[in-house]
Image: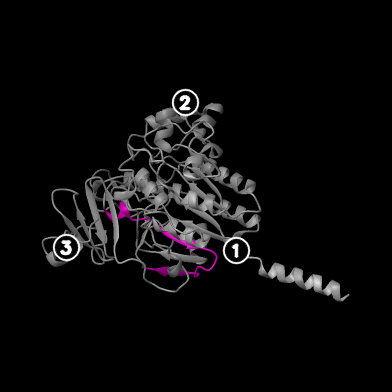
Amino acid sequence: MASRRSFLSAAAASIAAAPPRKPNLLLLLPDQWRPDWMPGNARIPVNLPNIAALAARGTRFHKVLCASPLCAPSRACLATGREYRNCGVASNAHDFPLTQKTYYQALQAAGYHTMACGKIDLHKKTLDWGLDGQRLLQDWGFSSGIDNAGKGDAVRSGAESPKDPYMRLLHGRNLAAAHVEDFKKRRSYSATHTTPLPDDAYCDNWIAQNAKTLLKNAPRDKPWHLAVNFTGPHNPMDITASMERNARARQYPQPNQSTEFNTEAHGKIRQNYTAMCENIDTRIGEIVETVRQRGELDNTLIVFSSDHGEMLGDHNRWGKHVPYQASAGIPLIIAGLDVEKNKTTNALTSLIDIGATFLDYAGAGTLPEMEAKSLRPVLTGKTGHHRTHLHSALEEWRLVWDGRHKFIEGFGNESMLFDLHNDPFENQNLVTIEKQTANRLRKRLI
């Protein structure tokens, strides 16, 4: 009997001494989501219950920039944890250099099963994803996944024959021709009619289904990382008939300093944009539920953000590319594990910090020349401070933001200085009025 007790005691001690399993890491990354199109904004009637639930389970960041407000550079900065000047991708005309290390590779080396699906956008110049979406996944550091084209690239490359798995799906279901013809009618943001596609062939719904399949097939004996790269709410303003049913009743504020369209047209554009956001929220709920069904929700760190914002007509501009807050600003919510719940923070944060945060939680170290900083001390309540300044840049222009004043150089004919506390829509350039502040921030540009 003593021998039996001794054996059981030894076994119990062995189990107790076993290190806890590393956390799973889930990144939910829409394309072109404005920082103000979020739950709790009284000005914007948007219904996002699943994103709101993540905020209740975690920490929401209010002062966040992407390192560059354009798809390929922003995602290169995220992958490497580097600022724009060092990310190796100057614009959408460049592919990600395969000589650069990614945080996905570092996680893989640390024992993670790394997955991604959707618009990964690390080979923007080369319009070839492989019909199975596998062409460069291993080179970037992914164990499995499906890489597909964004909205415009899918149609440009695959109108006649598919170059990516999404257009392969549409061609296989005899939907491609109607989809291509529909996109020809969407040269303007004001094209707000519904898509001819059924719900199950709508790209973001298909991406979510791929995400759920990847999760269901993920090994049980390894921690995993999954990046879900939605194509919406990027323009064009295509929504399905079912998405439109809840879109048309709501009224939205008109764009700031806009003269392009009338009130009704701007309203419909914003209704469609909201419908795309709300559809992604529904898909996020399904993905989180799949994690729950695996019994892994309590051991999963979940991040919701975007690669950049969307001007939606502010300053008579659309899309991204520009240093205004609606373009360079992004939402950020992090939930799960030891993250403080139902918390908001004004800690200055960059999109590149997501990779460093994941590597920290994974115990995977950092990447060479990484400029990102882990957010774990903020998430766990050890500090409310993260950075003193944030940076964003694209080709000719650069900006620096100290959380209140934002200084921009190389955009337009003169430098710009905005006080975002008193002028959140960036209408009054103070560069000749607050010269001391402008000079102080100019020295911080990178």
Left or right of 361: which side holds 235?
left
Is-magenta flag for residue 108?
Answer: no
Residue 222 at x, y percent in the picture? 62, 53
Label 1, label 2: how far apart the Cα atoms are: 44 Å
Q: Magenta segment, which residues?
A: 324-346
Binning the other alpha carbons within 10 Å of mark 1 as few (below 14), some (14 to 19) or many (20 upward) gives some
Label 1, label 3: how far apart the Cα atoms are: 46 Å
Taking depth in this image into account, of 223 and 317 the one nearest to the observer is: 223
Residue 362 at x, y percent in the picture? 52, 59
Instruction: Say which of marks 1 and 2 sits in front.
Output: 1
Q: Is residue 242 above or below residue 19?
A: above
Disc marking residue 298: 1
The first of marks 1 and 2 along the sequence is 2
User: Quadrant location of residue 405?
Assistant: bottom left
Q: Amino acid at mark 3?
A: Ala
Q: Amino acid at mark 2?
A: Ala
Q: Report the residue at 47% width, 59% height from top.
A: 365
Taking depth in this image into account, of 191 and 86 the one nearest to the observer is: 86
Please name the residue that numbered disc 3 is placed on. 438
SS at mark 1 in the image: helix
Judge whether residue 279 can be spotted in this image: no
Q: Which residue is farthest front?
A: 3
The first of marks 3 and 2 along the sequence is 2
Q: Report the residue at 65% width, 55% height from top.
A: 293
Q: Amino acid at mark 1?
A: Asp
Left or right of 170: which side holds 435?
left
Left or right of 262: which side holds 157?
right
Residue 261 at x, y percent in the picture? 27, 43
Left or right of 196: which side holds 257?
left
The first of marks 1 and 3 along the sequence is 1
Please name the residue that numbered disc 2 is placed on. 177
